[in-house]
Amino acid sequence: MARIVMKFGGTSVGDVERIKRVAQRVKREVDAGHEVAVVVSAMAGTTNQLVKWCGEVSRLYDAREYDVVVASGEQVTVGLLAMALQDIGVNARSWLGWQIPFGTDGIHGKARIAEIDTTEMVKRFSQGQVAVVAGFQGIGPDARITTLGRGGSDTSAVALAAALRADRCDIYTDVDGVYTTNPRIVSKARKIERITYEEMLELASQGAKVLETRSVAMAMQHGVRVQVLSSFVDMPGTLVVDEDEIVEQQVVTGIAYSPDEAKITLVGVPDRPGVAGAIFGSLSDSAVNVDMIVQNVSQDGKTTDLTFTVSHADLDRATHVLEKLKGELAYGEIVSDPNVCKISVVGVGMRSQPGVAKTMFQTLAEKGINIQVISTSEIKVSVLIGSDYTELAVRALHTAYGLDADAE
């Protein structure tokens, strides 16, 4: 007997028939003798509609009331799934975030989980009851409903698995696992049987949409074994595990891309101490996240050019912040480019294998693709290129690193 947390996303519970199919999957685990908690998202499209209504009512809405509204989608889903389970003879009840409770901080709209009290849930496991839990939501220090931000149901599931000391957390999505890259772009992309937490974290943060970044970080922190599976087909998925569980490492495990990038260059920035701090400090204060950064060497010792990337959504805000700094910093001009894409190759095997960056640069050069910015970490190399070359770059790199399905 094992203790399992099963998580189903919005597409998996998109209508009543799909909810009934989810109930059958849960029943299989119950019939196998396992203790089961199920975490669900709102039905596909529901949260978007709720967010839209909030914006239509008030442009500057109260974040606390926003959370009350957008958390309601999961309340519908847990109730329907609990009913569907009861209808096929499974002892089940629904749990909202405040009933467990999922204790969070008070940052409405993107709260972080502080603690989970699973005492009553575990007691009911011993009575053979399935817990159907609303993802994405919790309760803050002021007893107000909070939400965890987009993708928060993945985080809810992993956090619950950690609190329950579950044997595994199964994340059911509309894909059947984690692939070496997006199969819609590269038809020869392969499903990865096992991937390390670090690799999954890098892929998720660099644009892969299979798992939410915070959930992977939490799984790594607490040692929760995560399995990515399809809600629609019965086949093995991808296990996200500790590096020790993988016998032989690929040099490059996968290739991610993020089209949601914009490049900003400040031309003629004074080359003196404190300028970069003023620029990036002001951006941080305005909640603008900066990713890749490169500074040119100052030719005259007086001015230099500073290039960095932000998300598309933050481009206008970042430009506005920088324009207000022009009088103080006396830089020349701002040049922005929204038509860029970040391509990243990821693999823990890079730690012991030289030449990964060289292969990347040579492959892109052979395809006539210009590299605008480069950044690296211990297990990742990322480059910024023109967005028109995204698919060509991903396909070429996938082949260059021997990741194509027929390369074996």
Image (tube, rainbow, N blue to C red):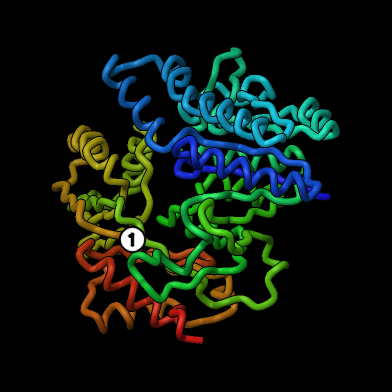
> Along the horizontal axis of the image, is 190 left or right of 250?
left
Toward which corner of the image does residue 359 lie, by quadrant?
bottom left
Q: Is residue 105 above or below residue 345?
A: above
> Along the horizontal axis of the image, is 13 left or right of 266?
right
Pick the residue in front: 86 or 287: 86
Near mark 1 (Cα within 10 A), the count class, few <14, some 14-19 or many ≥20, is many
Q: Position of residue 261 (x, y in %)?
A: 29, 52
Pick the residue in front: 123 or 336: 123
Tell me what residue is drawn at x 43 percent, y 19 percent.
69
> Along the horizontal axis of the image, is 328 left or right of 48?
left
Q: Does residue 328 appear anywhere in the picture?
A: no
Element on which disc 1 rests: strand
Q: Does residue 165 appear anywhere in the picture?
A: yes
Count of numbered tags: 1
Tell me what residue is drawn at x 35 percent, y 56 percent.
258
Q: Tag 1: residue type?
A: Lys
Q: Position of residue 128 (x, y in %)?
A: 81, 35
Q: Position of residue 247 (x, y in %)?
A: 70, 75
Tell me what residue is drawn at x 45 percent, y 35 percent.
43
Pick the residue in front: 67 or 82: 82
For disc 1, the marked residue is 342
Toward which corner of the image does residue 312 lie, by quadrant?
top left
Q: Position of residue 72 (x, y in %)?
A: 48, 22
Q: Is residue 307 above or below residue 131?
A: below
Toward which corner of the image does residue 251 lie, by quadrant?
bottom right
Tell me what residue is drawn at x 39 percent, y 82 percent.
400
